Image (cartoon, helix red, strand yellow):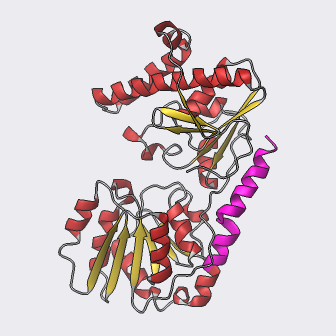
Amino acid sequence: MKEANIPFTLYYEVESNNASINDRKIQYTTLSFFKCYFGYFHFWLLVLSEIFQYLRRGCTIGFIKDFISTSRHTVRRAEYLQALIKKTPDSILYSYFFDDIAVSMALVATHTQNNVVTLSRTHGFETYDEQAPYQHIPFQTFKLNHIDKIFPVSKQGARHLQQQVKGNTDHIEAMYLGSDPHELYNPLPKSLSIVSCAYVRSIKRLDLVPEILKKITIPVKWTLIGDGEDLPLIKQLCSDLPHHITVDFKGSLTQVEIYDLYSQQGFTCFLSVSATEGLPISIMEAISFGIPVIATDVGGCSEIVTAATGVLIDKAFDTSALATIIEQFEQSEMATNEYREQVKCFWNENFNATNNYQIFKKRLNKC
């Protein structure tokens, strides 16, 4: 996702094994064996340390080969950026993700004599180890120590990263993302109707939803937006639900299709039972339509799911208790147009993309 009108000398975004600078695609620099491995000798010591970490966590040899290949691309990318900033004094390098892109920028910061400012956002998978392969984020300390400004998308994410830094943590500052503004509202449904939107994988714990649905005693419909490796499992678990429960698998939808769905089909609430999150765009999109939310208290969810927008539940929630909460939703104040107006106002004040990007741009102009 590219942020609009970033006011930088260099706007940097990776696409596969290529990159774009100010939207112009470039090829990474081809390096000699000596330059790649001996010119970045200290980095390869870090790579070796990370390999030991992964081996201790039981990774495969294929994973190690891919990791080494990615590390080579990281060096090539860093070398290209160093050559580029020699031609552009006082450059600013920005990455939307705090992954291997940020590692390349940290390498630039440690190798160049030119004035360069490095900035990066960070979301969930680059912030919390439990979201990363083998529950380990490589080069995290290196990035935290050498990127000038780091902007987690939640306050909780900022606190999490600050705890990993020895000394001053002023360079880590939360900056919210947002979803696109519109004037649409989700209509009140005539009966209990739940919607979830996620990439269907294990950390989303959508396999718990069929168990929750079985404990709801009144007619209910669950709509699932999204695709992923766990979708066949979810469909299988839903195959023997009671007759008063309906499930609608929408598959992967574009943002336009999701917005069309939210504007036409009424939903009682949005449901998220994830084991870990950053601060979900899917919840921002739901509350932008006034849809109340039930979500687990993980990552930055407590910053978007409040008394003004829905119900925050414990990560280790009881499925029977949650089924009761959902059943009672229709009789609560949250099933009113007045409450939905409040939900949308909360979104506009906190997660309107247009407003938040302007705030972000003003903050970056001070860097």
- Residue 364 at what x, y percent from top left? 76, 45
For image coordinates 41% across by 70% down, the residue present is 196
217 shown above or below 81: below
Q: Is residue 142 visible?
A: no
33 shown above or below 298: above
For image coordinates 33% across by 30% down, the residue present is 63
68 left or right of 75? left
Out of 323 and 193, give the one closest to the viewer: 193
For image coordinates 31% across by 66% down, the residue present is 208
Out of 216 and 87, give the one closest to the viewer: 87
245 shown above or below 130: below
Q: The magenta stretch spans which residues?
A: 343-367
Q: Is residue 79 magenta?
A: no
299 shown above or below 22: below
- Residue 303 at what x, y percent from top left? 61, 63
336 left or right of 203? right
Magenta: main secondary structure equals helix
Q: Is residue 186 visible?
A: yes
Q: Is residue 354 magenta?
A: yes
